[in-house]
């Protein structure tokens, strides 16, 4: 059973929602959201959508590079 299934909270400061996704801190570094401490970044649905929109171009470039 993973941490998300156990009910970990979102890693963004001032957010107390349940997390639905987790990312490594390196992947998340392209975003400008303020985070709590930790190795992994746990995101609620709202902040995951924000992260996806902000990093869309970077992720597309990475996909083209490998494939």
Image (spheres, grey):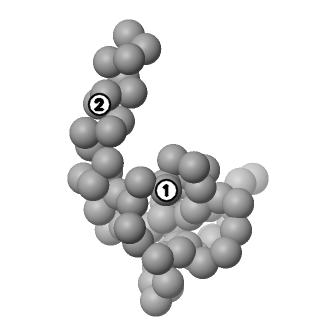
> Label 1 neighbourhood size at 10 Å, few (<14), some (14-19), many (20+)?
few
In the displayed image of the protein, which residue is found farthest to the top? Answer: 67
Nearest to N terminus: mark 1 or mark 2: 1
Residue in the image at 67% along x and 75% along y: 37
Up/down of 3 relative to 11, above or below: above
Q: In the picture provided, is 40 more to the left or to the right than 42?
A: right
Q: In the picture provided, is 53 more to the left or to the right than 9?
A: left
Up/down of 54 relative to 62, above or below: below
In the displayed image of the protein, which residue is found farthest to the right? Answer: 1
Q: Position of residue 43 (x, y in %)?
A: 48, 64
Q: Position of residue 44 (x, y in %)?
A: 44, 67
Which mark, residue 66?
none
Q: In the picture provided, is 33 more to the left or to the right than 54?
A: right
Proximity of marks 1 and 2: CB atoms separated by less than 8 Å: no
The tally of labels here is 2
Residue in the image at 49% along x and 56% along y: 29
Q: Which residue is mark 2?
A: 60
> In the picture, residue 7 is in which quadrant?
bottom right
Q: Position of residue 4 (x, y in %)?
A: 62, 61
> In the picture, residue 41 is in which quadrant?
bottom right
Q: In the picture provided, is 49 more to the left or to the right than 38?
A: left
**Residue 49 visible in the snapshot:** no
> Label 2 neighbourhood size at 10 Å, few (<14), some (14-19), many (20+)?
few
Residue in front for this viewpoint, 12 or 58: 58
The Cα atoms of the two marked residues, 1 and 2, are separated by 16 Å
* Secondary structure found at label 2: helix
Q: Position of residue 42 (x, y in %)?
A: 56, 63
Residue in the image at 59% along x and 55% along y: 25
Residue in the image at 27% along x and 43% along y: 56
**Residue 12 visible in the snapshot:** yes
* Secondary structure found at label 1: loop
Q: Which residue is mark 1?
A: 29
């Amino acid at each position: 059973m993973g941490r998300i299934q156990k009910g970990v909270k979102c890693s963004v400061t001032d957010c107390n929602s349940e997390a639905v996704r987790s990312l490594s801190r390196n992947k998340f570094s392209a975003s400008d959201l303020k985070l709590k401490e930790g190795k992994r970044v746990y995101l609620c649905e709202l902040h995951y959508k924000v992260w996806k929109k902000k990093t869309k171009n970077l992720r597309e470039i990475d996909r083209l590079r490998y494939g």
